[in-house]
Image (cartoon, coloured by chain):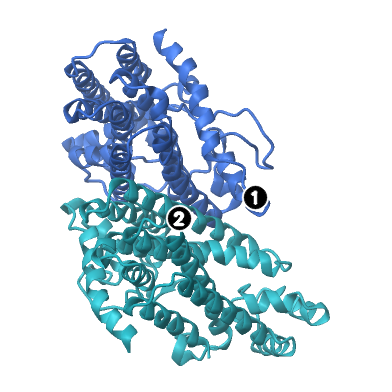
Chain colours: A cyan, B blue
């Protein structure tokens, strides 16, 4: 209820900030920016305006709410909110190429429409645009030293994204990935940008390193829980919720947490390993894999871990000692992201 | 002579700064950083140290010399020097994928060794590392507001790189590219990073916007001249100089400046257009193309343009009103880069 009002309050501001970060370019470059806008869900393949689903804008919302909760003016954090959303989208454009995923948000991925070379370059453009968006902090009255600190938080998150992606790509060839390695991977690939989003919001609001650290850890634990819930949905999520058929992650032989957990369970794990060693999985393979996950309690294990990170995230919020509407919205956002799985 | 001493003075500092920007990572990420180090010429495919040609480090040298010439302490500019070199290398890793170039500096390109997905991600890592290197300015005693200005200059150059690359990729399908469009492309793809290199050096040294603008324009004009000279060498350069056979750019049907100029010369241009419309060029096609370039005076035209930008670059240096050893070295660097063509 309250979260809904936060969405309604902030989403138009986030969209406006994003559009400002992508000001109209001079004519010969228009198609380059057109491809960027296409990915963000604003235009179709011919660059005509459309109303598409451009993503949930979770990271910018987290940034603005953390700023408000920590006592700041969320408008001041808008450049950071735009920056985290743009860099998230940079990583999606490149991930889609790297994973050969033909679709993104029910539309053809940038590389499917314009080819790999242009798509790599569109991602690079988004990376640069994200940084330029962050420059807006100074115009919002944020001091130069705080803005510079924001760049460091931001670029450490960018580096962590690529480290996580390296691990993810390297897992493709392995059946012996440990849960610890998996957690390190999603910490880089997902949790660090959530952490940076909350961190940047708090940094705009406050000079208190301890307070900022709590919001950072809130974001990180929330990001871990979010990714683990995604892993649960990738296997057991109904098509009506995920937009993908049940067990889609298994069919694609993804090494998500339930799979990694199951692969490490002696005999049963070996059975799953044999299935995952095949080039293409049949429906029967998928059914057998699902049965093995059931037998080893992979879903319960994974749900327990998600709940654990959710709890840790809430403890970090609690530790700030602050109580206000935005703080309640952050709890609501966490509940919203976690409860998708149940 | 003097330039040689500048190379000897600065190159070890630049290498040390680059190595510091790539500190040893924890074990599971070692191969990710190994791929980055491979691209920089420090290790082989098995990540054992080697002595390879890692690039000429022109941009960092330009940055440090501009800083010294403008009255600053070049050591303070080392983080910017490392940043421009790292972002240059980011663009090379991605360009090699986008152009399907199998070799870089006489070694297999990153994508040839580890595949396209990892190579895209290695480039992204270099992009983030470049930004983190720039954070070093604050540790060098550069004020937060100046460091923040440095980030803006840097990210505008990054965006210009991707805009230039977009134009370059879009030219592949066209025979009607104008000289103006070509110049806009190399301004983004090459000249802006030269401009940013000199700009950042001067920015560390000085608060005077006019002085900084002269170094910026010096770098930009030098970058334009440098790229145009590269175009000349790509067609008429001897293998002993370029490491590639004569007319290699024609064989690869590159749309470099001499070609674009010739394509726009009525009847002769049409003949060249017919050759460039073929899928693969025979030796006879290459000979005919070279003859057409001769007939329309493409080399003279291109050399004139290179000399013109060289002259403009020197005029910008002159306009600073400064005279010192580093200033002389900048002129020496310009002469070194331009005279390769003659």
Q: Is residue B251 visible?
A: no
Determine the secondary structure under disc 2. Answer: helix
Residue A204, placed above or below residue B154: below
Residue A152, placed above or below residue A110: above
Give A175 or A19, whichever is nearer the viewer. A19
Residue A106, placed above or below residue B29: below
Task: For mark 2, name the chain.
Answer: A
Mark 1, Cα crowd under 10 Å, few <14 / some 14-19 / many 20+, is: few
Give B14 or B267, whichever is nearer the viewer. B14
Residue B263, placed above or below residue A121: above
Horizontal side, residue B92 vs residue A278: left or right: left
- Residue that appears at 16% across and 53% down: A27
Mark 2, Cα crowd under 10 Å, few <14 / some 14-19 / many 20+, is: many
CA gap, disc 2 and disc 1: 17 Å
- Residue that appears at 40% across and 28% down: B76
Give B143 or B112, whichever is nearer the viewer. B143
The quarter of the displayed image where residue B295 is located: top left
Where does label 2 land, which residue? A158
Where does label 1 land, which residue? B26
CB within 8 Å, label 2 to label 1: no
Q: The C terminus of chain B lies in which quarter of the figure?
A: top left
């Amino acid at each position: 209820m309250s979260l809904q009002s936060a969405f309604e309050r902030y989403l138009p501001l986030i969209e406006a900030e994003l559009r400002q970060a992508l000001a109209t370019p001079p004519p010969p470059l228009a198609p380059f920016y057109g491809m960027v806008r296409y990915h963000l869900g604003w235009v179709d393949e011919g660059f005509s305006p459309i109303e598409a689903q451009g993503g949930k804008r979770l990271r910018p919302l987290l940034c603005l709410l953390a700023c408000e909760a920590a006592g700041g003016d969320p408008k001041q954090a808008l450049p950071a909110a735009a920056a985290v959303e743009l860099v998230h989208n940079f990583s999606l454009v490149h991930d889609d190429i790297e994973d050969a995923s033909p679709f993104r948000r029910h539309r053809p991925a940038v590389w499917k429409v314009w080819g790999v070379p242009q798509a790599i370059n569109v991602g690079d453009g988004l990376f640069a645009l994200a940084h330029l968006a962050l420059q807006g902090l100074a115009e919002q009255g944020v001091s130069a030293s705080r803005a510079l600190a924001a760049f460091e938080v931001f670029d450490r998150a960018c580096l962590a994204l690529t480290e996580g992606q390296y691990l993810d790509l390297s897992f493709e060839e392995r059946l012996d990935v440990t849960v610890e390695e998996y957690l390190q991977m999603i910490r880089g690939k997902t949790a660090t940008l959530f952490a940076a989003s909350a961190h940047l919001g708090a940094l705009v609001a406050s000079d208190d390193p301890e307070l900022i650290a709590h919001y950072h850890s809130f974001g990180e634990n929330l990001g871990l829980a979010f990714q683990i819930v995604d892993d649960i949905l990738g296997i057991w999520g109904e098509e009506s919720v995920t937009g993908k058929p049940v067990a889609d992650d298994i069919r694609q032989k993804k090494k998500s947490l339930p799979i990694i957990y199951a692969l490490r369970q002696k005999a049963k794990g070996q059975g799953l390993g044999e299935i995952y060693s095949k080039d293409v999985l049949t429906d029967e393979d998928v059914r057998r894999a699902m049965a093995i996950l059931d037998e080893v309690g992979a879903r319960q294990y994974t749900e327990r871990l998600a709940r654990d990170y959710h709890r840790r995230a809430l403890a970090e919020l609690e530790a700030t000692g602050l109580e206000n509407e935005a703080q309640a919205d952050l709890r609501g956002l966490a509940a919203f992201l976690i409860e998708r799985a149940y």
